[in-house]
Image (cartoon, rainbow, N blue to C red):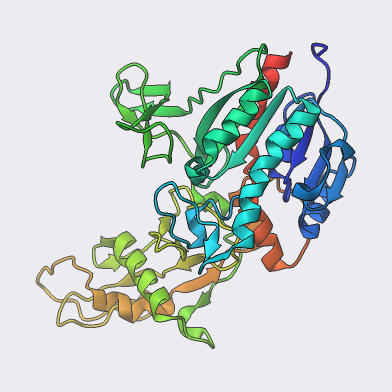
Amino acid sequence: MRRNSTITITDMFCGAGGSSQGATSVTGVELIMALNHWPVAIATHNENFPHSGHDCSDISATNPRRYPSTIGLIASPECTNHSMSNGKKKPGRQLELFQNGTPDPAAERSRATMWDVPRFAEVHQYQFCIIENVVEARNWPLWDAWIHSMDLLGYEHECVYLNSMHAHPTPQSRDRMYVVFWKKGNRKPNLNITPAAHCPKCAKTIQAVQSWKPGRSAGRYRKQYLYCCPVCATVVEPYYYAAANAIDWSLPTQKIGDRSKPLKEATLRRIKIGLEKFGRVTHYVVQPPPFILNMQNNSSPTQMHEAMATLLASANHKWLVEPPPFITNLQSNNAPTSLDEPLPTVLTGHHKYLTSPADWDAILDECGFRMLEPNECKTAMAFPAAYKVTGNKREQIKQWGNAVTPPAMELLAERVVATLR
């Protein structure tokens, strides 16, 4: 190809356009075609990329020759049935295609979309492909065959395991696998991601290196790999944007005690876990900070100074809890006192600074509690503020939860495009 020319790309399974947004943020990259089977997602994508071609169709049933050839392909094959978040147990490497002895159409479709990558690459002979999926897709029984098919088409590859919190400014912990293919004979892209971190031993900011735990070569941040200082090998925590950056603090939160429909016991139990985990006592004043309640897979609550837990496509799994500060009464098991009430009797003796579970039961009704709004989910995914979305509230949250975080795709696309110039 001609050096310094425009790098044209196709976005397959484009969704709301996270990959398109990230890739086209790289200078000289132009989106030519976007494909997806969901009309709402295509409508959103068209709003933000009106000069690109769009096709709303079942991609697995289409002929690749009907679309224009481009230099690169970015794709996010359906990941629902590869992910543990769908609630189905995946024993070992086996991903079930059957439920109760009958074929599961959703599972079959999810696997079929992976094969659309070599099917399109065979026809269009892309110079590169960047394929995004959940980490669990690596356990697909046909993984080796899928990789081999691309090898036969003339591609080399490397798998990048990247948490979106390390692709700034994404305030979300979101582990994903990116399989980067490039044509044999082309330069290999530099895919070593070295996020900035503070090394306490070297007492300075360093570029951290990915370090796999013994016996691991694929997986999630913290569980299967860490980051270390390249000089002294100290384990470090790369800089990240906190969940607080995604919250619109101007929005009101309804008190739990004012709800017309009581919360379920399981939800209340999770809130109390957060209160007990994050509550701090300062001279009898308990100051529990706001936190995010994660309703999926019994996940722990998230503090505001941490990266937000992975955003899913379901509309009711992220809730903001805003506990009020209160005074804990450490004598006679008295109930806690709100800061807008008179102080209880002050005794002469010192009392243990202890917050008992009964304190949390008494204060629970005063906690603010609301679901995260679509715009907050958009910010958590690091989409630009001006990015438009179509559909109702549930459809909007589904689009954000299914999307690729643009900064992660921008980071990888920039490395790949640099080899073609």
Camera-nearest residue between 156 and 384: 156
| Image-based side of 45 in relation to 163, left or right | right
Q: Quadrant location of residue 98?
A: bottom right
Residue 347's spot in the image, x, y percent?
Answer: 14, 76
Return the residue found at the far bottom.
260
Residue 196's spot in the image, x, y percent?
Answer: 47, 27
Camera-nearest residue between 343 and 23: 23
Quarter of the image containing the N terminus? top right
At horizontal 49% and vertical 46% (from top left) the residue drawn is 136
| Image-based side of 50 in relation to 393, left or right | right
Q: Is residue 243 above or below residue 25?
A: below
At horizontal 56% and vertical 68% (from top left) the residue drawn is 316
At horizontal 73% and vertical 22% (from top left) the residue drawn is 127
Q: Is residue 155 above or below residue 373?
A: above
Quarter of the image containing the C terminus? top right
Residue 56's spot in the image, x, y percent?
Answer: 83, 52
Return the residue found at the far left.
349
At horizontal 47% and vertical 43% (from top left) the residue drawn is 139
| Image-based side of 47 in relation to 163, left or right | right
Camera-nearest residue between 343 and 355: 355
Q: Is residue 181 visible?
A: no
Q: Is residue 249 above or below residue 184?
A: below
Camera-nearest residue between 387 and 353: 387
